[in-house]
Image: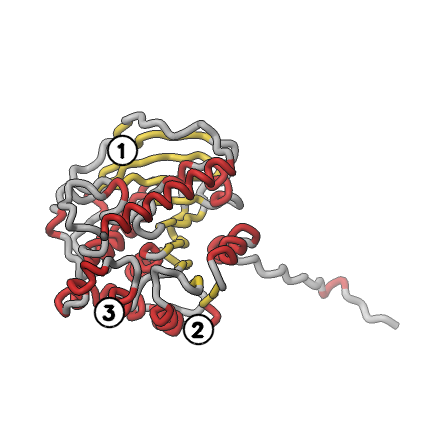
Amino acid sequence: MRFLVVCVCATLAIYTNACIAQSESPSTNAIQETGKANSVPSLTAQSHGENWTELDASKAGLDKSQIQFTILGTSDFPEYTSELVRVQWRRGDPIDLYVLRPHGVAKPPVILYLYSFPADTDRFRLEAWGSRVTKGGYAAVGFVSALTGQRYQMRPMREWFISELQESLATSTHDVQMILNYLAGRGDVDTTKVGMLGDGSGGTIAILAAVADPRIAFVDANNPWGDWPDWLKESRVVPESERAAYLKPEFLQKVEMLDPTKYLPHFSPGRIRIEQVVGDPTTPKDVQAKIAASAPSSGNVVQYPDARAEVHVWMTQNWWLKEQLQPSPAPPATARVSHDSETPEH
């Protein structure tokens, strides 16, 4: 039953992206794999040596000197350049990373995009989507979380994102930090103040990554998962045949420190926005309420009556993350008064 649920979700995602592609008529100038390799240090870390109880990637056993990368291909569009890079820092887990950079901006600010399991990175190949996210001079960087899409390989079929929830969340949180390390090493984007948009499980990972890495200045979490005891008990993502296993104390103990409700109260107001769709099937109503109550202030929570209302806002209004990442306006110049020219009036 679980595999049927995942397959249905994946099919819906593919169908949605196909509809977007048809309606937006993207360019046929797709990224081609070129196989160009860069000389980088050899990978030294063993994947099984990574500490999943640490949010900080460096404390978990990863280091930027372990980063390998290969440029698979680039594509130029009228408004931006798209690059597909295969990055790796643990054995057997290469990550396909999309880096979209707007034309005419030397070091654009970065927004990371991480969508919910089981979504893939199809949207990053759509020209209309790429034009929208890079509009205004912003770089867009995207990948998939652990045990998702192209990263779900060489694993027993009984292991999937939820059954390995600790690994899925912890390694993906580390991946965000390692991706920022890779981007910083490139030197063609600004990683000193980064925004991150996460959807569903990606929203959870965005919150955890922002706790670990101060370079993530702003987080937009859309329907984030969390409050694990109740989420695992009620969410439709969890198959009924497996639910009891995920409610056992030993399982809950492993994911306790990966619960975003533990960290949300410590965010400074204005650093995070939580978006929630009422009736979202993946996150029960009471869980949504607890996540919203954990936010640093009620002004950081936006709720939509349904998914259509949310899409309408996203398509018609300026993006919150872009607004936050804009440079602060310069203070108005103070007019100088020349006292030598001042004469009393008679």
Image height of 199 relative to 340, above or below: above
For the residue labelled by badge 3, is the local secondary structure a helix, a strand or a loop? helix
Decide: few, some or many residues near mark 3? Use Cα within 10 Å; few <14, some 14-19, many ≥20: some
Q: Amino acid at mark 2?
A: Ser
- Residue shown at 42% from the left, 58% from the top: 220
> Residue under circle 1?
70
For the residue labelled by badge 1, is the local secondary structure a helix, a strand or a loop? strand
In this rendering, would 106 be left or right of 166?
right
In this rendering, would 81 be left or right of 39?
right
Image marks 1 and 2: residues in contact by CB distance under 8 Å? no
| Disc ID at residue 6 | none
Q: Between disc 2 and disc 3, whose residue precedes?
A: 3
Q: CA distance from mark 1 to mark 2?
A: 43 Å
Q: Nearer the viewer, mark 1 or mark 2?
A: 2
- Residue shown at 27% from the left, 37% from the top: 86
Asked where in the image residue 57 lies, by quadrant, the reply is: bottom left
Q: Amino acid at mark 3?
A: Pro
Q: CA distance from mark 2 to mark 3?
A: 24 Å
In this rendering, would 130 be left or right of 331?
left
> Residue under circle 2?
297
Decide: few, some or many residues near mark 2? Use Cα within 10 Å; few <14, some 14-19, many ≥20: some
Q: Between disc 3 and disc 1, whose residue precedes?
A: 1
* Residue 63 percent location from the top left of the image: 20, 49
> Residue under circle 3?
229
Q: For this rendering, which residue is in front, 260 or 102?
A: 260
- Residue shown at 40% from the left, 58% from the top: 222
